């Protein structure tokens, strides 16, 4: 008796279903395991080699042997340019195009999921992945670091020293920063995903967008454009490793990503609500 | 069953419904009228626009021109009121291959905001039972045969009690036993009071279970009505066996009747329409033949079949691959 229930109708069961399908899928597990392997490989490599000369390799690599908690931060730093955007590109590019490719999109819409609701649920699923992915890297890094190296008070970039517990909190904060960083890319992926019925195409296009954004960010000729690129703040989390914490880049990042969500969310909406579902 | 307690006369009504893909008019000015409570066969050869029409009915594709109302409400504007009351199978089944049959149904049921979560498992189980898939409920759909997927697709349409079922080629990929089961399923759904709209390119399917039918050809609706109406509109033929063929032809000509299908097996076959298109009664024909001295050895009136009608309208034979 739908008309009696309209007020009660919500998207929560669909969101729960979306999260369960996403996180029970073998592909998602494979990507998270691959991300977790990054800190493990780095830590093991440092452990088996006699000494890392200071200043070689990624930042803080030489500090692993003194304090295992550095593994988490270093691994996040290593994953920012490629591994994290790669996995987010797969998830965000798959959102609508994956359903269209399987043909399940027509059955979700006939259920009726509602196009706007489906779009919101799909974006929420991608956002959930953006929360989980950096967290997996950070925690896998802290875990492997703690088991292979000594753990002690951590010296911040500002020279202040914090306790190991506080250091883990900072690590989670950096992961949260990267979550925010990836939300704009997810919105781009969602939009690209509404354009095609071929999920691999949308995934590849999203990943290419992240590479292009970073490459343009490297070109001095495009200086004026840099603050508008969604990757502009991707490496700006060093501010979170000072005492007191400088929130400027976190706020700037959030504002920028919010802008991307608004623009590409609107584009995805405009495309998807008028799209003929013929797959 | 209807939320507001209203029962509309037409479960589906389209007016001037058209869909253009590039230069091709896939659906061209279709005026469908599907009475509530009917089992409605939507017939047409492959590519005649059946699935495209169904997509527009369900709000999946926008009409280029024309309107659709389903259960008395305009589509796609009122989809959130209409679609929870409609179960559908469109252009074959489609599922997540990495989920089990039951998990697939739970997923699609969760997408219906009006389906109660508390009864979900029970309804999924009942739907699987109804299509004979209980034994494969926990199996990944990847491992399903085409026929099993088809059954799962029908189970999805039956997850909630529905007032209208739209089944696009529901027996595709099913074995004869499965086809019989679908037929009896459709009958039982109709007996429960649901309107069933079945598209098919298989005539036998429609003739056996439907009360009404419509025939599509190259995007156009070329006939619709009750089965009896459709059969009657296919004109009867007169079949005469005689040695006096020349004489008989003269008699038919004087009655204004024209040959239909020429001679077959030495018999003359004529349409039963005379001058002004009026039907000439068979007894009048025999009387005229006898009066002219034609030796009548055999005389038969053959009623038009739905198949004749279909062939006449679409210029194509049915693929009776059963
Ligand atoms: N996505 C599409 N793009 C272009 N043409 C299409 C598309 N879908 C269907 N058509 C065309 O529309 C016509 C009707 O197709 P369809 O409705 O699937 O027929 P049926 O279901 O009766 O077999 C066909 O000629 C087909 O080629
Ligand atoms: Mg079809």
Image: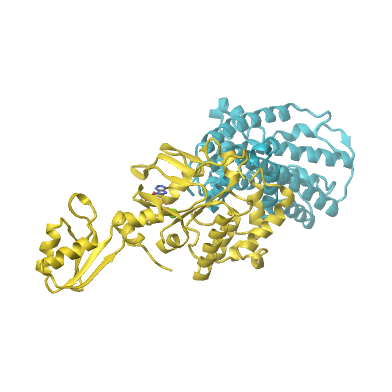
Quadrant containing the C terminus of chain B in the rendered view: bottom left
Examine the rendering and report whether any part of residue B28 can be seen: yes
Residue drawn at 73 percent across, 26 percent down: A248
Q: Which chain is yellow?
A: B
Given residues B209 and A226, the one toward you in this image is B209
Where residue A34 sits: x, y (%)? 68, 54
Q: Which chain is cyan?
A: A
Color theme of the render: by chain
Quadrant containing the N terminus of chain B in the rendered view: top right
Where residue A166 sits: x, y (%)? 87, 38
Q: Quadrant of residue B239?
A: bottom left
Residue drawn at 32 percent across, 54 percent down: B233
Residue drawn at 70 percent across, 51 percent down: A20
Given residues A246 and B82, the one toward you in this image is B82
Where residue A213 sits: x, y (%)? 57, 36
Given residues B122 and A277, the one toward you in this image is B122
Given residues A243 and B306, the one toward you in this image is B306
Position of residue A167 relative to residue B292, above or below, is above
Examine the rendering and report whether any part of residue B140 can be seen: no
Position of residue B261 relative to residue B43, above or below, is below
Query: Is A132 placed left or right of B229 in the picture?
Result: right
Query: Is A132 placed left or right of B251 in the picture?
Result: right
Where residue B59 sits: x, y (%)? 51, 42
Q: Quadrant of residue A255?
A: top right
Position of residue A265 relative to residue B244, above or below, is above
């Amino acid at each position: 008796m739908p008309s009696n229930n309209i007020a009660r109708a919500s998207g929560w069961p669909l969101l729960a279903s979306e999260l369960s399908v996403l996180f029970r899928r073998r592909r998602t597990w494979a990507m998270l395991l691959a991300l977790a392997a990054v800190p493990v490989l780095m830590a093991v490599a440092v452990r088996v080699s006699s000494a890392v000369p200071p200043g070689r390799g990624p930042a803080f690599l030489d500090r692993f042997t003194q304090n295992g908690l550095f593994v988490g931060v270093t691994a996040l730093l290593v994953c920012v340019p490629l591994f994290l955007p790669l996995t987010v590109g797969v998830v965000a590019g798959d959102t609508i195009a994956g359903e269209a490719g399987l043909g399940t999109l027509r059955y979700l819409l006939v259920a009726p999921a509602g196009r706007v609701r489906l779009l919101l649920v799909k974006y929420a699923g991608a956002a959930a992945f953006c929360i989980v992915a950096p967290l997996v890297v950070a925690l896998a890094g802290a875990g492997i670091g703690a088991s292979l190296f000594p753990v002690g008070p951590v010296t911040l970039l500002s020279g202040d020293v914090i306790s190991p517990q506080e250091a883990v909190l900072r690590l989670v904060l950096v992961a949260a920063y990267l979550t925010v960083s990836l939300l704009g890319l997810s919105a781009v992926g969602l939009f690209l995903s509404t354009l095609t019925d071929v999920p691999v195409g949308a995934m590849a296009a999203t990943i290419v967008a992240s590479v292009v954004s970073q490459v343009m960010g490297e070109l001095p000729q495009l200086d004026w454009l840099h603050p508008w690129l969604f990757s502009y703040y991707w490496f700006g989390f060093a501010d979170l490793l000072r005492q007191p914490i400088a929130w400027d880049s976190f706020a700037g990042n959030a504002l920028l990503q919010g802008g991307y969500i608004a623009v590409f969310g609107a584009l995805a909406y405009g495309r998807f609500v008028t799209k003929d579902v013929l797959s | 069953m209807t939320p507001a307690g209203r029962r509309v006369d037409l479960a589906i009504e389209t007016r001037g419904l058209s869909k253009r893909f590039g230069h091709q008019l896939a659906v061209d000015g279709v005026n469908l009228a599907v009475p509530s409570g009917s089992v409605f066969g939507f017939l047409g050869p492959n590519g005649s626009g059946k699935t495209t029409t169904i997509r527009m009915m369900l709000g999946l594709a926008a009409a280029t021109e024309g309107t659709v109302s389903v259960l008395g409400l305009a589509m796609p504007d009122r989809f959130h009121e209409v679609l929870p009351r409609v179960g559908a199978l469109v252009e074959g089944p489609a599922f997540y291959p990495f989920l089990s049959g039951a998990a697939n149904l739970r997923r699609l049921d969760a997408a219906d905001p009006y389906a109660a979560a508390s009864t979900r498992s029970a309804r999924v189980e009942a739907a699987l039972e109804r299509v004979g898939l209980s034994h494969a409920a926990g199996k990944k759909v990847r491992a399903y045969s085409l026929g099993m997927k088809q059954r799962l697709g029908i189970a999805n349409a039956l997850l909630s009690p529905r007032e209208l079922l739209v089944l696009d080629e529901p027996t595709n990929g099913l074995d004869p036993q499965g086809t019989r089961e679908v037929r009896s399923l459709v009958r039982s759904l109709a007996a429960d009071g649901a309107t069933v709209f079945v598209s098919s390119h298989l005539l036998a399917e429609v003739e056996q279970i439907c009360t009404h039918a419509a025939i599509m050809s190259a995007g156009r609706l070329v006939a619709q009505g009750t089965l009896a109406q459709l059969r009657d509109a296919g004109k009867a033929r007169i079949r005469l066996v005689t040695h006096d063929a020349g004489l008989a032809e003269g008699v038919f000509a004087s009655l204004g009747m024209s040959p239909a299908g020429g001679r077959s097996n030495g018999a003359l076959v004529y349409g039963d329409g005379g001058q002004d298109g009026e039907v000439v009664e068979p007894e009048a024909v025999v009387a005229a033949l006898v009066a002219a001295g034609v030796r009548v050895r055999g005389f038969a009136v053959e009623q038009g079949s739905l198949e004749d009608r279909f062939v006449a309208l679409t210029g194509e034979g049915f693929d009776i691959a059963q």
